[in-house]
Image (cartoon, grey):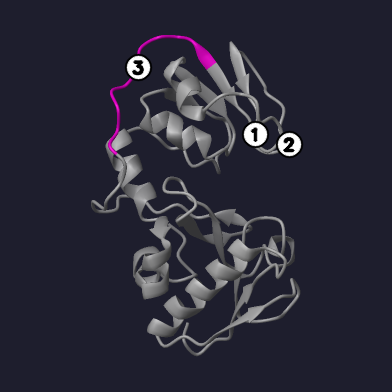
Amino acid sequence: MGTQSTVIHCNRSLDHQRAWAGALKKGFAVHGIESEVSYRADTHADIHVVLGPWFALKNWKHSKTLMLDRAYWGDPDSASLHWLEYGEKVFLRDMPKRKHPRLKKQKEGDRRIYLCDFRQKPEGDYDTVRYHPSEKKSQGSLEDALQAHDVAIGKRSTALVDAAIHGLRVETNDPHSPVYRITDRRQWIRDLAWHNWSKAEITSGAFLDGIGQPNYTG
């Protein structure tokens, strides 16, 4: 990887993207990898880093691409990191223990809440809908909503991760959802922890030891 060109695509108008791009550049440098921060979505390189799904992802879905996205926990001081395969996040499996939130006792009731992702409409059978907070702000806290329900339904929303941690049973038919493969919650949260990194861990380069090389296929 060190002999290949690496570009970090960054939306110049967003302060948080510039901060994450700087942290990634320092982290790559720890491993002897020279990277370029580009404020263009179409800058060519051997390896691409995209910050979220909106700025540059569509250009590099089928390349060697690393995606930094919203954290599964610890937002905004942490972020999630995944290598992509055919434009979808690769999830590590059977990983050793790494620090993660404590799992709450599994609930047994049947009150169901649908957790919508951005610009998504609810589907199926549910009692309550919680829309993406950027689309509907007056909904109360996510924690209160989870406490009042026993089953969470959705697609790829990170709120489903919160739901699983809080003991709700989660349901999704999206194979790329972070909660799709839950059979053993303890192993699931352990695996997911290897994709959730603090800004300090990214700056130190520790993330790259954790998630491996870009040709990782699971």
Residue at left offset 41%, top offset 88%: 32
How far apart are the alpha carbons under marks 1 and 2? 8 Å
Local packing at callout 1 (Cα closer than 10 Å; few below 14, some 14-19, many 20+) is some
The tag earlier along the polypeptide, 2 or 3, is 3
User: Is residue 169 shown above or below 185?
Assistant: above
The local secondary structure at tag 1 comes to loop
Residue at left offset 49%, top offset 42%: 178
Q: Is residue 180 visible?
A: no
Give whichever of 177, 43 is nearer the camera: 43
Residue 62 x, y percent position in the rendering: 66, 65
User: Is residue 121 shown above or below 218?
Assistant: above
Q: Nearer the viewer, mark 1 or mark 3?
A: 1
Name of the residue lying farthest toward the left: 97
User: Is residue 5 shown above or below 14?
Assistant: below
How far apart are the alpha carbons under marks 1 and 3? 24 Å
Give whichever of 124, 165 is nearer the camera: 165
When asked about the image quadrant of residue 30, the answer is bottom left
In the figure, is residue 216 to the left or right of 104? right
Q: Which residue is mark 1?
A: 132
Q: Is residue 113 visible?
A: yes
In the figure, is residue 202 to the left or right of 55? left
Q: What residue type is disc 3 on? A: Lys
Start-end of magenta stretch: 102-112
Q: Which residue is mark 3?
A: 107
Q: Which residue is mark 2?
A: 119
Tell me whether the residue at label 1 lies in contact with that at label 2, contact meaning CB atoms closer than 8 angstroms.
yes
Q: Does the stretch in magenta take in 109?
A: yes
